Image: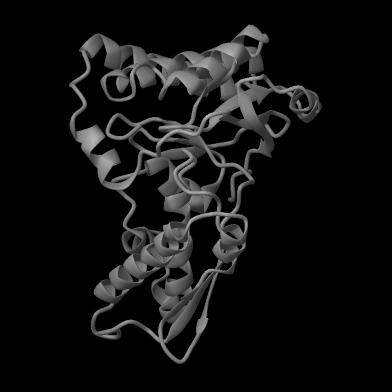
Amino acid sequence: MAPFGGVGLMIDRPQTFVRVEPGERFAVRTPAVSEQLDRGQSDRDKADVEQRVLSVTRRFCQQFAADFPELPAVTCTVFQRPAAHTGLGTGTQLALAIASGLCQHLKPTFATKRIIQTVAGRGARSGVGNEGFFSGGMIVDTPPVRAIDFPGEWTMVLLQPQVALEPVAGLEESQRFSQLPVPAESHRRSLMEGLQRLVSAVEQQNFAEFSEAVYEYNHRSGELFKASQGGAYNGAEVTRLITQLREMGIQGVGQSSWGPTVFACFPTRSDAETFCQFPPAASSTATLVSAQAIRH
């Protein structure tokens, strides 16, 4: 939601798993991506991961230029990495994981939250992801950024529309944000009121109130981007999927970031499991996920 703030939930999957270890020279290994390539993914996925690792490592060298005038002799292995550009902030989590690994391995006394965030270089993209990497929980990205406990029994299902969208990321994402019109004061006020309603529902563990609040807040937030994405949601396929979910009686639904991922909220894991057996026709996949508990 930057530059307007927002809210997001850290979830238990998909996961990112990287390892940084000594090597003869700087190298990047991507076994997880290689497995994807065997299943027909493009070489661009592998190149994208390698470039992300290299960019973070270069920022690490800039941060500690006196000790690392050139790339360090380490091997960065990406064992597990979710699909990019699905609206789940996976690029931010990958960058933070690499930055954390480099700092802990090479400069452990400086492996602070602030330095890891600086090395990752994702501060302008996602206050939610930057905070959530360290804290878990539900992140409220309005000053001060904070994490709050999310009821453990509430369960989410992530859905993908039948037809894949062109991803919104990188330069295009930055350009879209820069072209956003200044929202009317009434719209800003309604967003803040909606966010407060959503947070209060979570703190009071009122699932019905939370479900309607998250739908309304997500829809109102999306309206800020209607000139860029054609409406409150990014395209006809996402809109159709959300409409079908609401028609099924599921109130707490919305688009994650730019999409195409759509989320649906359920009061219990059992309810979510039952839903996954009979997902809507407009979806291609349905994945059950849980919130990450706050790490105190």
Left/right placement of residue 63 relative to residue 92 reads left
Residue 133, compared with residue 26, is above or below; it is above
- Closest to the observer: 174 or 136? 174
Is the image coloured rainbow, by chain, by secondary structure, or in one colour?
one colour
Which residue is at a point 33% across and 82% down the rendered structure image? 71
- The answer to which quarter of the image holds residue 156 is top right
- 265 relative to 51 in the view: left or right: right
Q: In which quadrant of the rendered image does the N terminus lie?
A: top left
Residue ranking furthest to the bottom: 24
**For this rendering, which residue is in front, 277 or 289?**
277
Label tally: 0
Task: Say whether residue 18 is left or right of residue 269.
Answer: left
Q: Residue furthest front?
A: 40
Front residue (pair 43, 147)? 43
In the image, what residue occupies the spot 21% across and 13% down?
Answer: 184
Classify 114 as above or below 246. Answer: below
- Is residue 47 something one can see in this rendering? yes
Q: Quadrant of residue 274?
A: top right
How far across and down, in percent of the image, does residue 56 sit?
35, 66
Q: Quadrant of residue 59?
A: bottom left
Residue shown at the point (28%, 77%) measured from the top left: 64
Residue 209 visible within the image: no
**Vertical placement of residue 194 versus 78, above or below:** above
Place of residue 13 in the rendered image (x, y in percent of width and height, measured from the top left): 63, 46
Q: Residue at x 49, y 51 (%)?
A: 133
